[in-house]
Image (cartoon, rainbow, N blue to C red):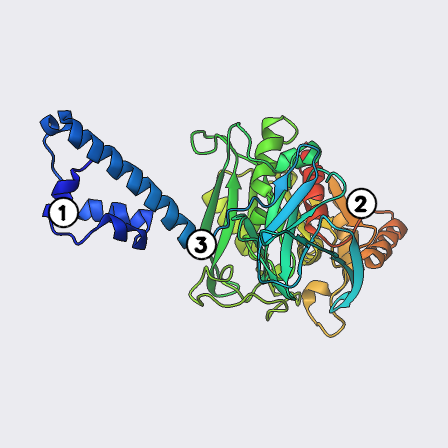
Amino acid sequence: MPNIGLIQQRNMGLRIYKLKKYSYLSFFILLQYYPFKYNTNTLNNTNMKKQTILAVLLVLSVASFAQQAIWGGQNTSSPQINANNTVTFRLEAPKASAVQVTGDFLPTQQVDGQFGKHDVPGTVDLVKGSDGVWEYTTPEALKPELYSYSFIVDGFKTTDPSNVYLIRDVASLTNVFLMGGGRADLYKVTNLAHGTLARRWYQSPTLNMTRRISIYTPAGYETGKKQYPVLYLLHGMGGDEEAWIALGRTVQILDNLIAQGKAKPMIVVMPNGNAAQEAAPGESALGLYKPTFQLPKTMEGTMETSFPDVVKFVESNYRTINVKSSRAIAGLSMGGFHSLHISKQYPDLFDYVGLFSAAINPDKAVKSPIYDDRDAKLKTQFSKTPKLYWIAIGKADFLYKENEAYRKLLDNGGYKYTYYETEEGHIWKNWRIYLTEYVPMLFK
């Protein structure tokens, strides 16, 4: 610990009473630029020991103050998971007139949206205490799940300043918390052998651009010579190559299933399904722009046409088993749409196909060779007997009837598929469930 007297002698202009102006990080940067020397013999002096201890206490105190100021945290605990699995939300807002919380732990209500009726979380009021802290505790225990939520303060939707764990979904930023147990334990980081997540850039000649892609390799990939099967996992509209990582908990799910012996070790490739994008918002030369739905070249055939560029990059740069029986494709919503049409367009590529709450039909105004001759292409695809054609959807999903009609078409053609149905609607809770069900069936 540097001698406080020497600090003063070096005329740095630092005074202990002014240290609150500096962050913890800034203080140590200063130490790097101004190295201090001390004589170890002086530390035997009782007075010097007292000064050293005082300096340590002051620095720690200031660091604590600085961290609070920088990150804007509150001294409240929120969300607090209680012993009986109820959850308490708190917000310090003494001048607010009304505070509510909304999130997927609450009952949903149906509203009309751009794509038809869909479910949105309800809201519930917090109660203000005499200390200016608003509070709400769920009346019942919450089931195991990864939950998201936001506060609404006097009509303004905002995040919880006491919770640093946030996830972006398209242009919305929400807090999250994990209620462990059951299937939700697959969403946890646990003490086991971990795989590696890489963000790579590849050249797409079809799109004439360099694009970013997320790739998971299982534990042991870097140190071994083994070849692996590949799952291509596609996101929904408004998502990008980050969606399945952040919202889908793909890395945690794969690590846990593989470690438990419930899934084959595999590579998981998560491309950006927006053919107009180089990469996720903020991760390309376009800078920090606001994410939106309905980008150019959405669900009009370009993504499907360019998909072989992704496969070529992966199989040229990773130790993959390059046969149909070692390739799988799956996706949610728009990604399910892409999976359906990519797999029938290239019937020799994938032996495993997963449609998670998939959109089925292209817009009537869209004209593309990719969507022409659907019935004939399906006949060719199923004549090659894919090992698994898996369809999953929630009962309340706005795409339920479209999927029901598609299953009837498959039934009429005598095409074999596996169907999995859940409760609720077009939500990440379901897509995480589907991933945990689908992955163990692959590459058997």
Please report the residue visible at 21 percent of the width from the left and 45 percent of the height from the top. Answer: 31
The quadrant of the image that shows the C terminus is top right
Left or right: where 149 falls relative to 200: right
Mark 1–mark 2 distance (CA, rounded to whole Å): 68 Å
Q: Nearer the viewer, residue 79 or 169?
A: 79
Left or right: where 15 falls relative to 202: left
Residue type at numbered disc 1: Gln
Which mark is nearer the camera, 3 or 1? 1
Please report the residue visible at 63 percent of the width from the left and 35 percent of the height from the top. Answer: 186
Looking at the picture, how far across and down is residue 166, in whole percent?
Answer: 55, 51
Few, some or many residues within 10 Å of mark 3 (<14, 14–19, 20+) = some
What residue is shown with label 3? Answer: 201
Q: Nearer the viewer, residue 436 or 97?
A: 97
Q: Nearer the viewer, residue 211 or 58?
A: 58
- Secondary structure of the residue carrying numbered label 2: strand
Q: Are marks 2 and 3 in contact (CB under 8 Å)?
A: no
Can residue 351 be spotted in the picture? no
What residue is shown with label 2? Answer: 422
What residue is shown with label 1? Answer: 8
Give the numbered dot on residue 35: none
Q: Reply above or below: 191 against 163.
A: above
Q: Reply above or below: 199 against 209.
A: above
Residue type at numbered disc 3: Trp
Looking at the picture, how far across and down is residue 133, in whole percent?
Answer: 59, 52
Residue type at numbered disc 2: Thr
